[in-house]
Image (cartoon, helix red, strand yellow):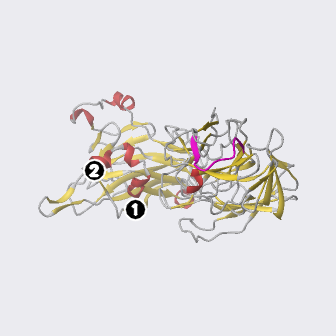
Amino acid sequence: MNRRIIVLAIALATAVSCEKALEDTSLTIQAGFEEEALPASKTYVQSSGAGTIWWGTTGADKVIYAFDSSGNKKAFTSSSTQAEAVRAFTCSSWSGGDWKFAIWTGKTSDYDNCILSGSVFTGNSLEVKNPQTVSNSKSFDNTANIAVMKPSDGVLRNVFGYLRFNLPVYPGTTDISAIKSVELTTKENVAGNIRISYSGSEPVTSIISNGSKSLTLNTRWKDNGPTGYEAGVVYMVLPAGTYHNAKLTITPFAEMPTSKNAATGETLSVNFSGDLVIERGKYADCGTLPYKEKTPDPVVGWPSDTDAFDYGLDPGDMHKASIATSLFAPYGVKNGTNEERTISSPILVDGITYGGPGMMYFGNRVSSQKVASQWSEEYPDIIPTSCYFSFKVNRPGVLRFYPASGNRDGNAQDGYVVRVPTYYLAAVTTVNGVTSARIIKEVTMTENADGNESANRSDGNIYSDGWQKYWVSMEVTADDIRGIESAATLYLYHRNPKVNTLNVYYWPLEWTNTE
């Protein structure tokens, strides 16, 4: 199945037209979505960069239902798998003249039983889905929405509105949610079987049976890049209306949510300050949800040194180091021969010190030899004097980087094996007037990218889901740097005592604040 990402806000000026075939038994309806709907209900992008429109390839994405003037229903299907703002749906057995209404229900013919009486849609398959589970990256449950259309509309029109949440990241991660589920409770029913009346200019949705005053949204589980429950912006689908005594009950994780059965903690309740108003086709924004009771700030806070790599970052913000040619040029590092790329002495670029000699610059990456015997006199076996990356941080966070080893053991006859480095992160801290250094993280990867392979040096590959297994994450916890009086200095380097040469290519370092 193609990967699909929801469009949160996109302007679509689409037209709906009917093309009557030469024979009365065939009819085609061309359908898109209204431009003012936020988010546009079944509009996807195949590429978030290109912004191309995508309906998807599932059975539910390939069928709409149309009713003739007598209320008879026919399925109109599409075989298209192309990115498109408007999709053609055809019925080969149509004989009812012009169509009166059309509906997209998110259900295939085996599960759809909606009927039309006059201008009112009913049927057990029409409902506010409860619970809803986010099924597309940072969007909503893609089978929860419903859209209707008249020939004069020119577009499919969503019958629901939305409640938008921003799920915060779990501490020590960059995109794993700290929250497993969110439950909305109100004085009125928010879920159940519905009827849709479209006699006027707007479709009006009402809950008519099996009403529930609570509605649950579950976080999306993802199997890659990295595995876990996904943080970010998500939407709950519910009828338009004014809701009283609205409250959110939040279920947070009590442990790292990288498995489906991760333990949850005590729930947290948040009351709305006034009435909750939901408009058709639009969202009400709840902002970033809390996942624990707020605790008082410590008497002594974290430092805020302006030359630190994390200065000015809010929790969850990420700073990606820049290694652009223009930044390295003042130090005599140019795009030319290997000699001109050599970093012969430590240089500071965009908050990162590149500890030459033993390092080189290649335009989109920096290579570094292994640390051997080049240790500082004050902190031997902890802080190297060359072949390192160093930077300052004021607060806890997560360091991420992509490495590719440039050396192999063996020969063509016996087979090559990528030399395996161990990555170290050391910290120099000053607490109560005493400066000390220690190694706080040590990581040896089980899967190593071979830097001799061009695919492992492609930016397009290394930032994709398939290459996430090669990335290294090192968390600096509050306990690692607790009590620091000024920014801590971190040193990243690699070693392997069993080999003489071990060159590793490093792509720009990424730091994400977690405090």
Q: Does the magenta stretch include residue 96?
A: yes
What residue range appears in magenta?
87-100
Q: Is residue 48 magenta?
A: no
- Name the residue beneath numbered marker 2: 451
Amino acid type of the residue tagged 1 in the rendering: Glu
The residue at which mark 1 appears reads as 442
Q: Which of 42 and 506 is in front in this view?
A: 42
The answer to whether residue 138 shows anywhere in this view is no
Tell me the crowding category of disc 1: few under 14, some 14 to 19, or many 20 or more residues within 10 angstroms, Cα based.
some
Give whichever of discs 2 and 1 has the lower sequence position. 1
Residue 42 numbered mark, or none:
none
Left or right: residue 172 compared with residue 388: right
Q: Which of 198 and 364 is in front in this view?
A: 198
Tell me where residue 463 appears, x and y as whole percent: 42, 47
Q: Between residues 196 and 143, which one lies in front from this camera angle? A: 196
Mark 2–mark 1 contact, CB under 8 Å?
A: no
Q: What is the x, y in percent for residue 387?
A: 31, 48
Eye-nearest disc, 2 or 1: 2
Judge whether 391 appears above or below 331 on screen.
below
- Mark 2 residue crowding within 10 angstroms, few (<14) / some (14–19) / many (20+): many
Is residue 500 visible in this depiction of the protein? yes
Q: Which of 300 and 108 is in front in this view?
A: 108
Residue beneath the point at 62% across and 71% down: 263
Which residue is the extreme one toward the front?
Answer: 23
